[in-house]
Amino acid sequence: MALPDPALVAASFAVAVVVGLTGMGGGALMTPMLMFFFGVPPLAAVGSDLVVSAVTKPFGAFVHLRRRTADLRLAGWLCAGSVPAAFSGVFLARLFGRGGSVQELVATATGVVLLVAAAAIGVKAYAEGRRGGASAREVTDHAQHDVVVRPILTILIGIIIGLGVGLTSVGSGSLVIVALTAAYPRMPVRRLVGTDLAQAVPMVFAAAAAHLIAGDIRLDVTTALLVGGIPGVVAGSLLSSRASSRVLRPLLALILLASGLKLLNLPVAAIAATLAGAVVTVAALTLRARAAGDGGQPRAGGGPQPTATQGAGPAEAHGPQTSRTRG
C-alpha cells in the first residue's frame, strides 16, 4: 500500500489545528481545500471528509458526555431530522443528473453553504460583541436553566442542516451552533457545543454511510486526512487556551467567503472586491459592537458588577441544566 501524500497530510494537519482552535471549520475548510489544491472531485471530497468526521467527532462527543455538557433530549430531536436528511441528501443530488452535472451541483451547493457558514460566523461574533463578549455568557455555564425543548423547530433545524451536510459535508459544527444559539438563547456555550457534537456523530455516520454505498470515497484521500487530522485536532485543542478566537474566527469567515465565491465561479476581481468590502464591514461592526459593549461596563472606581450567580444558593449556582419538552 502506498504511503499517504505528504502534502495532503500536512494540509490536513493545518486545517485540523484551526478546527481545534476555533471549534468550527472542519468540512468548510477541508472540502474546498481538496477541490482547489488537490484536484479531488467534489463528490469524493465530500465523501472522504465525512468519513474522517465520522472517525474524529466521537472523541469530542465522548468528552462532553463524560462532563455532562450535552443535552441528550435536544440532541435526540435534532437527530430525528438530521440523520435521515443527511442520508437522503447524498442521493438527492443524483436526482438532478449524473456524471459531471452531479459534480457541478455538489460544487455549487458547497459554495452556497460556505457563504451561509461565513455569514453565520460573522453574525455570531457580532452578537457576542453586543453582549460584551463570550465571557458574559460563560458566567452562567453552571447556573440552573429550565430549557424548553421545541420539537418541531428543532427537527426542522436538523433537516436543513442534515441536507446541507449530506450534500456538502459543511455545517455540522458552525451552522448548528448558530441555529441552536438563535433557538435556545438561554443555553450556555459549553452545552451548545456538547449538544452539537452529540447529534453530529449519528448525522455524519449516516452521511458517510450513504457516500460509501454510492462509491464516493477515495481511500488514499481518507487515509491522508486521518493521518494529518487526528494529531492536528489534538494540537489545536491544546493551543486553544493561548489563542484568541476573536482573531481566528473572522479570518476563518473570510476564508470561507473566498472559497464559496470561488466555487460559484465568480471572477477573481469580484472575489477581491467582495473580500475588501467584507473586511471593511467587519471592522465597522466590530468597532460598533465594542462601543455598545463598553457602554455597559462599570465606570472607573466603581464596584464590580454582580454576576448571574451572585446571591444564588449552592443548588442554584451549581445545579445541572435540565430540559423539558414544550407540550
Image: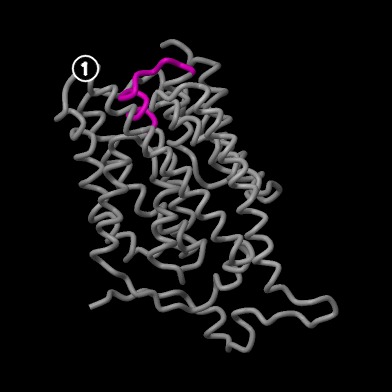
Specify how the rendered protein is coloured: one colour
Image position, residue 45 (x, y; %): 37, 25
- Location of the C terminus by quadrant is bottom left
Residue range corresponding to the magenta coloring: 37-49
Q: Nearer the viewer, residue 260 or 57?
A: 260
Q: Nearer the viewer, residue 262 or 323?
A: 262
- In this picture, residue 116 sits left or right of residue 276: left
Which residue is identified by label 1? Answer: 99
Total numbered labels: 1
Image position, residue 81 (x, y; %): 24, 53
Above or below residue 305? Residue 31 is above
Which residue is pictured at 23% across the width and 20% down the height? 101
Farthest residue in the left direction? Answer: 95
Which residue is pictured at 79% across the width and 83% down the height? 303
Asked if the stretch drawn in magenta spans residue 108, the answer is no
- Residue 48, quarter of picture: top left
- Residue 293, quarter of picture: bottom right
Which residue is pictured at 20% across the width and 47% down the height? 84
- In this picture, residue 160 sits left or right of residue 241: left
Which residue is pictured at 68% across the width and 74% down the height? 296
- In this picture, residue 258 sits left or right of residue 159: right
Mark 1 lies on a secondary structure that is loop
- Residue type at mark 1: give it: Gly
- Location of the N terminus by quadrant is top left
Image position, residue 139 (x, y; %): 61, 71
Asked if the stretch drawn in magenta spans residue 42, the answer is yes
